[in-house]
Amino acid sequence: MLTRFVGAGRLSALAFTLYVPALVAVSAAASWLFALACWAVWYCTNTLAVLNGVTLRQQLTPDELQGRVNSSARMIALGGTPIGALLGGVLAETVGVRETQLLAIVPVAVAALVLWWSPVRRFRV
C-alpha cells in the first residue's frame, strides 16, 4: 500500500533516511526507555527497507529465476553477518559501543544519499 502511494524507490530511500536519526538517537540515549523507543523506530525502518527490497526483487524477477535470484540475494545479505558481527565486536572493544553504532550508520547514510540522488527514487511498480 505504501509503495502505491509513495513509490517503491522513494519508500526505500525514505526507510534508509529514517534509519539514520533513529540509530543516532539510540546511541545517544541517556535512558534505556528512550533508547528502546528509538530502537523500535529503527527496527521498523529496517524492516520496511528489507521488505520493500524483497518485494521488489520478487516482482521484477521472472518466475523461472525466482529461486536462483532469492537464494543469491539471501546469501549476499546474510553471508556477511558473521564478519560484520566480528568487526562490530572488535570495534566495540576498541573504540566503544556508542562509537561503533555511529560508525555503523555511515554506510546506511551513504546508501540513503545514493538512493535519493539516483534514478531509483523515481522507480514505481
Image (cartoon, grey):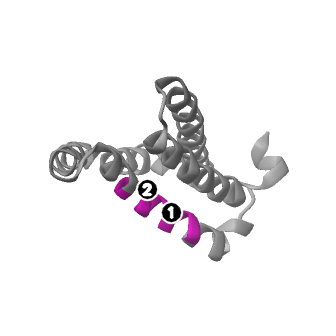
Q: SS of the residue at dot 1?
A: helix
Quarter location, residue 14:
bottom right
Q: Marks 1/2: CA distance?
A: 6 Å
Query: Label 2 crowding class (10 Å Cα cut-off): few <14, some 14-19, many 20+?
Result: some
Q: Which residues are magenta?
A: 103-113
Dominant secondary structure of the magenta stretch?
Answer: helix
Contact? badges 1 and 2 (CB < 8 Å): yes
- Residue 103 x %, y %: 35, 58
Where 46 falls versus 9 (above or below)?
Answer: above
- Residue 119 x %, y %: 66, 75
Horizontal arrangement in the rendering, residue 64 relative to residue 16 (left or right): left
Q: Is residue 41 visible?
A: yes
Q: Residue at x 55, y 37 (%)?
A: 47
Q: Which residue is mark 2?
A: 105
Q: Is residue 62 visible?
A: no
Q: Residue at x 63, y 49 (%)?
A: 59
Q: Which residue is mark 1?
A: 109
Q: What amino acid is found at the position of numbered circle 1 in the picture?
A: Ala
Q: Residue furthest right?
A: 5
Q: What amino acid is found at the position of numbered circle 2 in the picture?
A: Ile
